Amino acid sequence: MPPLGEVPARMHASVIRPERYGPPSQGFAMEVVDVPAVGRGQVLVYVMAAGINYNNVWASLGYPYDVVAGRRKKGEPEDFHIGGSEGSGIVWAVGDGVTSVRVGDEVTLSGCTWDETAEDIRLGADPMTSVTQKAWGYETNYGTFAQYALVKDFQCHPKPKNLSWEEAACFLLTGATAYRQLCGWPPHTVEPGDPVLIWGGAGGLGSMAIQITRIRGGIPVAVVSDDERGKHCLELGAEGFINRNDFDHWGRLPDTSDGAAMAKWMKGARAFGNRFWEILGERRAPRIVLEHSGQNTIPTSMYLCDTAGMVVICGGTSGYNGDLDLRFLWMRQKRLQGSHFANIRQCRQVIELAASGKLDPCLSWTGDFADTGRAHQLMYENRHPSGNMAVRVNAAAA
Ligand code: NDP
């Protein structure tokens, strides 16, 4: 480790460039780049470990959004992208006006940024709904896939002392996103006894959502694609799991005027619902459905969700065109709610759960810095282990 606070001119980084856009194994490469200057209200963090998330699979693909072109259009000079929307590290330098952290503080970093002087925030908006809000390390440069990351001061949170660097790096993005989905949209917050359906229960979001649901007294039921992943969900507290490969009604909804196709789809959706009842041991529908799988699953989510319940969605892994039969929405008075990461209060609540030992960060895989592309490739192919993943950046292997 260099002397505390001594900032070098150049650093190693795992970089995405437009000329390499494609699957992560091709998109990411190790390079040496300039360390960014630290502006007012900003903090330079010596990155110990970085969490791996799906957003930088999208960044590497250059689809559905070209992150480099987007930033260059706004006048930023860099022709490359350093992703990484969460991590842990040591405060190495602070810009003018920063009083909340000091050089040497050990921190966990949260993954959204905004302009605290924006009019909507000054008028009382949740910063996550501000027009200035951006996913840091995806829509912005200088994330945690480099030796030094550049954040705003409010992205720095005390690192839980009970967690290793890698554990502290891997859970906040998925944990806080799941927390906002499950606790941030009253009156549809998880209450004791509420059944909750969780897609991708063994994934990053799912592993956090199962635990948060249990902590709040709800009954989590997970969906997975193999029984090994189902076992992981049971260990985290799921009441049971549904293997989605036992069903074949996935994808876009048939046209409602095609009676035969619709009947076939309904048969699949009902069988899926029966499996949910079997697990609960009673005929109750999920009050909340935690969605992120998107196009392939949203028709089933909207169908199965309880009357006056909520489907809350934060992603579209299988595609962005969400079909729904509007009759289920209005006649059963359901809510379809978009949700995106989390505000600072929600981040702190999740960090507190991890710091108190109630929430397991579920670190399942740790790689070296040079493995950053490989980790994203595993995620892209849905071949990654259950839970959350991290790479050691400056931290030494244990
Ligand atoms: P993971 O890859 O860890 O988990 C996703 C899980 O989804 C997989 O384990 C897989 O489980 C399941 N899955 C994949 N394809 C399908 C499909 N076609 N149908 C049903 N399930 C599927 O990713 P994360 O949990 O980290 O993220 C999930 C999504 O949420 C991503 O699209 C990500 O971009 C988004 N996200 C959004 C955030 C936000 O703030 N808006 C924050 C965090 C994530 P299995 O195969 O076992 O069913």
Image: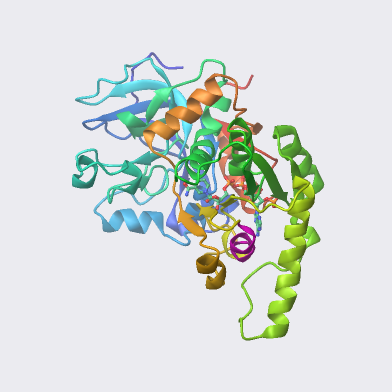
Determine whether, in the image, residue 231 is placed left or right of residue 162: right
Q: Which residue is painted at 42% across and 17% down in the image?
A: 2
Can you see residue 37? yes
Name the colouring of the figure: rainbow
Nearer-the-camera pick, 54 or 231? 231
Q: Which residue is painted at 61% across and 57% down in the image?
A: 305
Residue 340 at what x, y percent from top left?
44, 48
* Residue 211, placed above or below residue 5: below
Bounds of the magenta segment: 297-305
Q: Main secondary structure of the magenta part?
A: helix
Determine whether, in the image, residue 69 is placed left or right of residue 174: left
Work out which quarter of the rendered image holds the C terminus and state it: top right
Can you see residue 48? no
Nearer-the-camera pick, 188 or 79? 188
Nearer-the-camera pick, 106 or 60? 106
Q: Does residue 254 belong to the magenta stretch?
A: no
Residue 363 at what x, y percent from top left?
63, 31
Residue 255 at what x, y percent from top left?
61, 81
Q: Which residue is painted at 46% across and 28% down in the image?
A: 349
Nearer-the-camera pick, 125 or 75? 125
* Residue 396, placed above or below residue 279: above
Looking at the rendering, which quadrant does residue 359 occupy? top right
Q: Which residue is painted at 52% across and 30% down in the image?
A: 169
Looking at the rendering, which quadrant does residue 89 occupy? top left
